[in-house]
Image: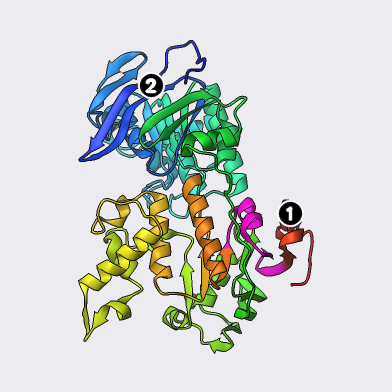
């Protein structure tokens, strides 16, 4: 598919690049051109080859075939240092700063300006860092310790560090995944400033609305192959989804009608001092209840208190009519509750363990006889759920950290669904996964509800809440401010309650 491109020579380009890892062909003849002053999006499902492409541009991987071009001339990056010296910088979703150094020291670590006798010129370091932040148009104290910085501020430090190396190409890999709305707006302002200064920006995000708001062009990958490079002007989100998944995605929110049954989970006047107060709600069998609210409203904390991860100072949780003592996830599991946490990498998985062992973490009782674990039973259990949830993997013995984000999420779901829960709490179930896998997760939740599971779904994605929930509960500053039936739930009504502008008794 050909579309007009800027007539200038690309700052950085790939031409016909292929890369394989054993029998897996991660990239197949991919081309990409990044121009100065342009934000270029890279779109594709998990496993489409985006990470391999980024690492090829950053010098981590060398292509098997094809060419990397810098200012129109072939170049070979033998490592990340070569790419950095050529002006290519990668800003990752989770920056890695030295926490005990200041912001300025992190920017210039290992190459600080020095005075006579080799002493570090701390004043020059501070002034240089301050000038970088002025260029970016952000207010950040160069002397502030890196420890305690928000993810958004850490990313700004990494961007300033890239500018200090005279970076001409900035690759931003899912930079907004952990940011609030105001932080995203500030980051977009920084990207606009970088473009105006002549930088080429490659922007990777699962949030299609961000791609359309920020970028001028988009390249789409599918199954490691180049599908299209085209201007975003005149393109719709449906067009882009069709390129990414190879089909029309008619039902991103495949909500099935389900018979609503008895109350499975009842939360009564739950309180944790300083976090949330007097929270009461019910979830019935066959029902998907959405829990909405702004970041910091207390949604995840309520879920953790219900499951027993965090203490509760007052109130009670009742499961199938029986009170649940707090303070122990094992008691919640025994009562039939499962919790899929918000942060799958830190809380949902052991990243260095295998796929089958991660799925088996909740099933020791089912796979143990006489105090000894049956590896065959564990493998059979893991295989059963991996097939049911269509997890894409090479071997069950592979480390779970090698999977794409969407497949990692499926492993977390498999781990908990294997316990046959009566109540399933899912916190941000589709954060950071592609649209195709998102539809699969929604279909799974809908099917579970139709089978009589009570589902409590916490999400910051309003279309997801509106598309999947039978009822919407809304929290604001630690309190439940609204309960809205599906027929009355709109973005406006939910946001009004989430911002405290409307109070409606739950």
Image-based side of 42 in relation to 165, left or right = right
Please report whichever mark, 1 or 2, sits nearer to the chain's N-terminal start: 2
Q: Residue at x 23, y 83 (%)?
A: 369
Quarter of the figure with residue 190: top right
**Which quadrant holds the C terminus?**
bottom right
The answer to whether residue 434 is visible is no
Part of the protein shown in magenta: 458-481
Q: Residue at x 58, y 42 (%)?
A: 184
Q: Is residue 36 above or below residue 179?
A: above
Reply yes or no: does residue 465 show up in magenta. yes
Tag 1 residue: 490
Question: Which element is circle 1 on?
Answer: loop
Q: Residue at x 35, y 60 (%)?
A: 386
Tag 2 residue: 12
Disc 2 residue crowd, few under 14, some 14–19, many 20+, Cα 10 Å: many
Q: Looking at the image, is mark 1 or mark 2 nearer the viewer?
A: 1
Q: Is 242 in front, or is 398?
A: 242
């Amino acid at each position: 598919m050909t579309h007009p491109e800027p007539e200038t020579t690309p700052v950085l380009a790939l031409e016909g690049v292929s890369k394989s890892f054993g029998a897996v062909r991660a990239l197949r003849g991919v081309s990409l051109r990044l121009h100065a002053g342009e934000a270029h999006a890279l779109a594709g499902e998990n496993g489409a080859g985006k990470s391999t492409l980024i690492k090829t541009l950053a010098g981590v991987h060398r292509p098997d075939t094809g060419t990397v071009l810098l200012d129109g001339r072939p170049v070979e990056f033998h490592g990340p240092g070569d790419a950095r010296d050529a002006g290519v910088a990668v800003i990752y979703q989770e920056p890695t700063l030295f926490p005990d150094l200041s912001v300025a020291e992190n920017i210039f670590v290992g190459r600080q300006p020095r005075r006579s006798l080799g002493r570090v010129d701390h004043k020059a370091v501070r002034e240089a860092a301050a000038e970088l932040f002025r260029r970016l148009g952000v207010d950040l104290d160069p002397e502030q310790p890196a420890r305690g910085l928000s993810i958004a501020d850490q990313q700004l430090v990494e961007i300033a560090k890239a500018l200090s190396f005279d970076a001409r190409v900035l690759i931003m890999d899912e930079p907004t995944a952990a940011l609030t709305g105001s932080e995203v707006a500030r980051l977009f302002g920084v990207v606009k400033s970088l473009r105006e200064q002549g930088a080429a920006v490659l922007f990777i995000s699962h949030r299609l609305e961000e791609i359309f708001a920020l970028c001028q062009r988009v390249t789409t990958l599918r199954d490691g192959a180049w599908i299209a490079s085209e201007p975003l002007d005149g393109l719709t989100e449906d067009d882009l989804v069709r390129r990414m998944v190879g089909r029309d995605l008619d039902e991103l929110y495949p909500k099935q009608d389900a018979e609503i049954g008895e109350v499975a989970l009842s939360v009564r006047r739950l309180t944790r001092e300083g976090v949330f107060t007097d929270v009461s709600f019910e979830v019935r069998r066959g029902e998907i209840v959405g829990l909405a609210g702004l970041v910091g409203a207390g949604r995840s904390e309520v879920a953790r208190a219900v499951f027993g991860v965090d203490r509760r100072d007052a109130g009670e949780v009742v499961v199938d009519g029986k009170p649940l003592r707090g303070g122990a996830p094992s008691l919640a599991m025994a009562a039939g509750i499962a919790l899929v946490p918000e942060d799958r990498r830190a809380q949902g998985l052991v990243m260095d363990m295998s796929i089958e062992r991660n799925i088996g973490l909740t099933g020791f009782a089912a796979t143990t006889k006489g105090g000894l674990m049956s590896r065959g039973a564990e493998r059979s259990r893991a295989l059963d759920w991996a097939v049911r949830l269509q997890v894409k993997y090479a071997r069950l013995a592979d480390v779970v950290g090698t999977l794409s984000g969407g497949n990692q999420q499926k492993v977390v779901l498999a781990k908990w669904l294997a316990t046959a829960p009566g109540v399933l709490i899912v916190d941000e179930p589709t954060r950071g996964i592609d649209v195709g896998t998102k539809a699969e997760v929604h279909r799974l939740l809908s099917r579970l509800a139709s089978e009589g599971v009570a589902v409590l779904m916490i999400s910051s994605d309003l279309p997801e809440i509106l598309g999947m929930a039978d009822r919407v509960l809304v929290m604001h500053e630690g309190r439940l401010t609204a309960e809205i039936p599906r027929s009355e739930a709109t973005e406006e009504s939910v946001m009004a309650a989430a911002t405290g502008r409307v109070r409606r008794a739950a």
